[in-house]
Image (cartoon, rainbow, N blue to C red):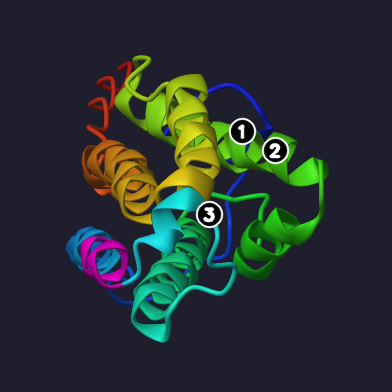
Amino acid sequence: MDSSGAETQAGPVRNGPLPPLPKIWIGYVLGIVTLVSELVAVSLHPEIANGALMVPPLYLFLPAFIGAVYWFACIYQYHVVMSHIPGWRHPISPAKAVGFHFIPIYNVYWIFKWLQEIARFVNSSLKRPAMRPLMAGGAILVALLLRFLDAGMGMLLLFLATSYVSTCLRPAIAAFAAPQPVPPEPPPFS
């Protein structure tokens, strides 16, 4: 594939199929479970709605925590897939992609940075601006902030933005892996 820029440097050649993209539906299920547990918690403990109860019940905390961990697993898996694409050198390792989310203040920049690198691959593979990292990053940032107010709705929005990344990556991976037509050899001069 012929594109300009450093991102087209040939990466390590890997044999076999690519690892699968993360299953986003699991995040949606965890978001719905969190919403239901919020409703149960507020009906059993009305003081939660007023903010008087500082420690959430375990049945409310657990799905919200598992959803956050699963979101990081999805980010990790995206970068595993990106690092296994033959002929593509992805500049972000899976561990770095997740780990930099835990650095205060820098993590806001980091959301947009890793999305920009994935968008660079998507847009160069499809040869058109198919993925908009600012839109996805803004949605992820809003979702993370919303999780402080309503964990279930924040998680649903978080996985909605994450499904946008998967939706953009699928055709880009297929386009990048498709064999490029080879121009015919010119006839020899006699």
Q: In the image, what residue occupies the spot 43% across and 31% down? A: 139
Q: Is residue 96 left or right of residue 87?
A: right
| Residue tagged 3 | 51
Please state the total of marks drawn on the protein image. 3
Q: In the image, what residue occupies the spot 48% across and 59% down? A: 75
- Of circles 1 and 3, the one toward us is 3
Q: Is residue 100 magenta?
A: no
Q: Against 112, is 84 above or below? A: below
Closer-to-camera residue (118/87): 118
Q: In the image, what residue occupies the spot 22% across and 61% down? A: 39
Majority secondary structure of the magenta segment? helix
Q: Quadrant of the C terminus?
A: top left
Is there CB contact under 8 Å for labels 2 and 1?
yes
| Residue tagged 1 | 112
User: What is the secondary structure assignment of the residue under circle 1?
Assistant: helix
| Residue tagged 2 | 108
User: What is the secondary structure assignment of the residue under circle 3?
Assistant: loop
